[in-house]
């Protein structure tokens, strides 16, 4: 029994350290709101080009620049969000981003389902961007809202 208690205590200690790491104070970037808005605008333009290209049967090779723009702008948004708040990785908004990335990546192995996969990614993006802050900023590690809610 003492061994089990020690294992439980060790696990609780790891969780506490992880929670502390993710709860690091947020950072602000001068002009950060304009940067986020600009990155999201570029991302929406790229997503529109990629989605429209698939909807209208544009050859895959011609969609590579749009895919590259989607990945570059999305990656820049992720870097910006994580730089501001580490907790982003385990909040619903971060998890939604990983789901979208998985769906977009799935297009390469499920080409015939590309419209469905890309549509699901767009739906997840729209819903997660417009859900109330109490859901968007929910930390799956903590089981509660953690981090900045002024943005939501």
Image (cartoon, rainbow, N blue to C red):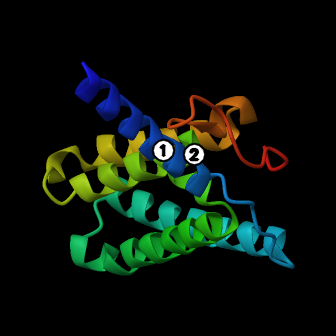
Provide residue 72's location: percent of width, then percent of height: 47, 77
Residue occupying the point 33% across, 32% down: 6
Label 2 neighbourhood size at 10 Å, few (<14), some (14-19), many (20+)?
many
Depth check: 13 or 27 in front?
A: 13
- Is 102 situated left or right of 25 in this image? left
Q: Is residue 132 above or below residue 74?
A: above
Q: Which label number is shown at residue 127?
A: none
Q: Is residue 60 above or below residue 11?
A: below
- Disc 1 element: helix
* Residue picked out by circle 1: 96
Q: Residue furthest top?
A: 1
Tag 2 near tag 1, CB within 8 Å: yes
Residue occupying the point 57% across, 57% down: 21
* Residue picked out by circle 2: 93
Residue occupying the point 41% across, 64% down: 50
Number of numbered discs? 2
Q: Examine the image and state in which quarter residue 130 appears.
A: top right
- Is 47 situated left or right of 39 in this image? left
- Is 99 situated left or right of 124 in this image? left
Depth check: 9 or 43 in front?
A: 9
Provide residue 37's location: percent of width, then percent of height: 75, 67
């Amino acid at each position: 029994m003492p061994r089990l208690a020690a294992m439980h205590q060790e696990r609780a200690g790891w969780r506490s350290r992880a929670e502390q790491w993710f709860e690091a104070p947020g950072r602000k970037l001068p002009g950060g709101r304009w940067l986020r808005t600009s990155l999201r605008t570029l991302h929406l333009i790229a997503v529109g080009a990629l989605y429209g290209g698939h909807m209208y049967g544009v050859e895959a090779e011609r969609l590579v620049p749009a895919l590259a723009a989607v990945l570059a702008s999305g990656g820049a948004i992720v870097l910006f969000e994580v730089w501001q708040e580490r907790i982003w990785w385990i909040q619903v908004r971060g998890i939604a981003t990983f789901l979208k990335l998985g769906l977009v990546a799935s297009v390469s192995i499920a080409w015939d389902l590309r419209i469905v996969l890309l549509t699901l990614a767009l739906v997840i993006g729209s819903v997660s961007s417009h859900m109330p802050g109490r859901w968007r900023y929910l930390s799956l590690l903590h089981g509660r809202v953690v981090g900045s809610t002024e943005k939501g």
